[in-house]
Image (cartoon, rainbow, N blue to C red):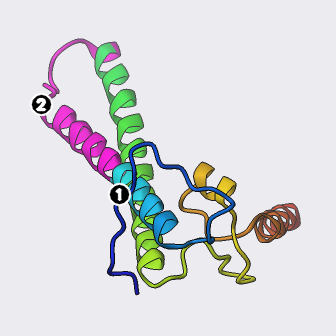
Amino acid sequence: MTSDRVELKKGYKPKKSEAYMGPKQQEYFRQKLLNWRDELVEESRETISHLQSEVRDVGDEAERATRETENSLELRTRDRYRKLIRKIDKALIRLEEGEYGYCEETGEEIGLDRLEARPIATLCLDAQERWELRQRQLGDAR
């Protein structure tokens, strides 16, 4: 369990020369995940606020249809955010438990580049590719 937080210098980026998932890297990804989560929560609040403040009975049928389509898109986006927030929360738990950055399938390092691009990654690249191949095969079998 990580309870000792490290102070990061402004502009800090994890380096391959550092100990993998050492205190600095853990804190870096913790802050990255928390900031991303905060942004998604704020965008969701704005969506809810927008939908609540909208007047529903204004305009003709075409305008209402357009508005319904826009609302549907906003709700789908909000649902995606909700699922993403759940994945971020799971990544934060993995961080606290010392499992973050390691593949759930193989136990290998996921790698800094992959985590930088997708901080919620739970599989190393090889395991991810195997998973995607299985998904494609299942899709073809149906």
Q: Looking at numbered disc 1 in the image, what kind of residue is underneath it?
A: Leu
Residue 42 horizontal side relative to residue 77, left or right: left
Query: What residue is at 21 percent from the left and 12 percent from the top?
Result: 59
Q: Quadrant of residue 125?
A: bottom right
Count all numbered tags in the image, as a single digit.
2
For residue 50, above or below residue 132: above
> In the rendered structure, which segment of residues is drawn in magenta?
38-62
- Mark 1 secondary-structure assignment: helix
Residue 89 horizontal side relative to residue 15, left or right: left
Residue 60 part of the magenta-drawn span: yes
Q: Quadrant of residue 62?
A: top left
For residue 20, above or below residue 38: below
Query: What residue is at 35 percent from the left and 50 percent from the top?
Result: 35
Which quadrant holds the N terminus? bottom left
Q: Main secondary structure of the magenta part?
A: helix
Query: What residue is at 39 percent from the left and 68 percent from the top?
Result: 89
Q: Nearer the viewer, mark 2 or mark 1?
A: 1
Q: Which mark is residue 34?
A: 1
Residue at image mark 2: 53
Q: Looking at numbered disc 2 in the image, what kind of residue is underneath it?
A: Ser
Q: Nearer the viewer, residue 20 or 137?
A: 20
- Mark 2 secondary-structure assignment: helix
**Residue 25: where, in percent of width, then height?**
51, 64
